[in-house]
């Protein structure tokens, strides 16, 4: 009974502007690689974030993790940082790092990882559009 | 009378900011949406036309052609763009979802063939917020 691992999930969302650009490359190369995503005046997305936490339910509470605590943590660490922002201009995390869905997922994972009990495994799924989404780490 | 809807989508940046107001007033009215460096959305666009199906084809209108009209006159102008800066038909307008829906109606209306009528523009800004415009 005590070794049964359960995955719990919390979904949150944020809206942000961004553009994909590698400052080491010239304009033509950026345009060729990133296409419309490189347009200079930014575009944006409704990002949906699903945070997965895996562990054995606490015998006293029956919880893997209190979902209210998880929700508050995501809001404080992620939503307040990125919601209604320009990822390239308004956030220190993407000053130098290209804000692809892949990189955003890694940044979000790192922001949350240190705040969640290390006995629990974690994975982040980030939807950039309803049809494009990424997961980090790739395997839990 | 039959109603036919074609769904398209685009991603764009915008902000809600009235240039004739102070920054404080904009922040008070529009909150986070007034962020000066923009934010953005995945927009879902539902275009509904109405009419009597053609007896020979059974079609109200070829849905693929409707898609092409929407792509040419709306999606190509707004997709991966900044609505406030890049879009000619939103120049000098507030880039609310309401005004964008009206703007899209005006873009499409002249290109809808005479035997059908444009009925509704339904535009989702987020999964939980959408507007409808019926040309009234």
Image: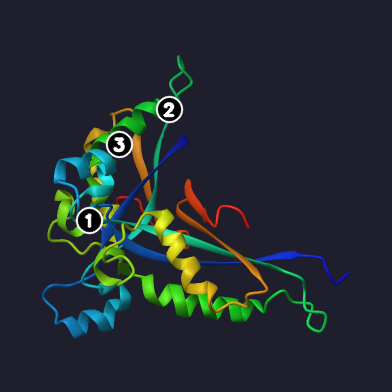
Q: Do marks 1 and 3 share a chain?
A: yes
Q: Position of residue B58 (x, y in %)?
A: 48, 20
Q: Residue at x 20, y 54 (%)?
A: A23
Q: Residue at x 31, y 69 (%)?
A: A85
Q: Residues within 10 Å of mark 3 (few under 14, many from 20)?
A: some
Q: Left of B119 or right of it: where is B23?
A: left
Q: Residue at x 18, y 53 (%)?
A: A40
Q: Secondary structure at mark 3?
A: helix
Q: Position of residue A39 (x, y in %)?
A: 21, 49
Q: Secondary structure at mark 2?
A: loop
Q: Residues within 10 Å of mark 2 (few under 14, many from 20)?
A: some
Residue on which the image places disc 1: B83
Q: Which comes before the other along the chain, label 1 or label 2?
A: 2
The chain letter for the residue carrying disc 2 is: B
The chain letter for the residue carrying disc 1 is: B
In which quarter of the view is residue A88 placed? bottom left
Residue on which the image places disc 3: B71
Q: Secondary structure at mark 1?
A: helix
Q: Do marks 1 and 2 share a chain?
A: yes
Asked if labels 3 and 1 touch by Cβ distance under 8 angstroms, the answer is no
Mark number displayed over residue B60? 2
The chain letter for the residue carrying disc 3 is: B
* A35 or B17: nearer the viewer: A35
* B87 or A21: nearer the viewer: A21
Q: Left of A109 or right of it: where is B21?
A: left
């Amino acid at each position: 009974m005590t070794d049964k691992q359960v995955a719990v999930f919390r979904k949150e969302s944020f809206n942000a502007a961004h553009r994909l650009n590698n400052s080491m490359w010239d304009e033509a190369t950026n345009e060729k690689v990133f296409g419309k995503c490189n347009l200079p005046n930014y575009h944006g997305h409704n990002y949906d974030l699903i945070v997965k936490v895996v562990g054995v339910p606490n015998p006293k509470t029956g919880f893997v993790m209190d979902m209210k605590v998880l929700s508050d943590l995501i809001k404080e660490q992620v939503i307040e940082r990125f919601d209604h922002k320009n990822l390239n201009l308004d956030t220190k995390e993407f000053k130098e790092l290209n804000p692809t869905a892949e990189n955003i997922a890694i940044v979000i994972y790192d922001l949350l990882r240190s705040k969640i009990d290390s006995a629990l495994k974690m994975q982040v799924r980030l939807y950039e559009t309803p049809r494009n989404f990424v997961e980090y780490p790739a395997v839990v | 009378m039959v109603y036919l809807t074609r769904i398209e989508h685009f991603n764009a940046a915008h902000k809600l900011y009235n240039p004739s107001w102070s920054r404080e007033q904009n922040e008070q009215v529009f909150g986070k949406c007034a962020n000066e460096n923009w934010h953005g959305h995945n927009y879902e666009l539902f275009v509904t036309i109405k009419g009597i199906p053609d007896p020979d084809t059974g079609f109200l209108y070829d849905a693929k052609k409707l898609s092409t009209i929407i792509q040419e006159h709306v999606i190509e102008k707004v997709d991966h763009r900044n609505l406030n800066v890049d879009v000619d038909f939103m120049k000098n307008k507030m880039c609310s979802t309401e005004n964008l829906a009206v703007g899209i109606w005006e873009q499409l209306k002249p290109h809808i063939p005479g035997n059908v009528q444009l009925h509704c523009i339904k535009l989702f800004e987020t999964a939980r917020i959408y507007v409808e415009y019926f040309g009234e």
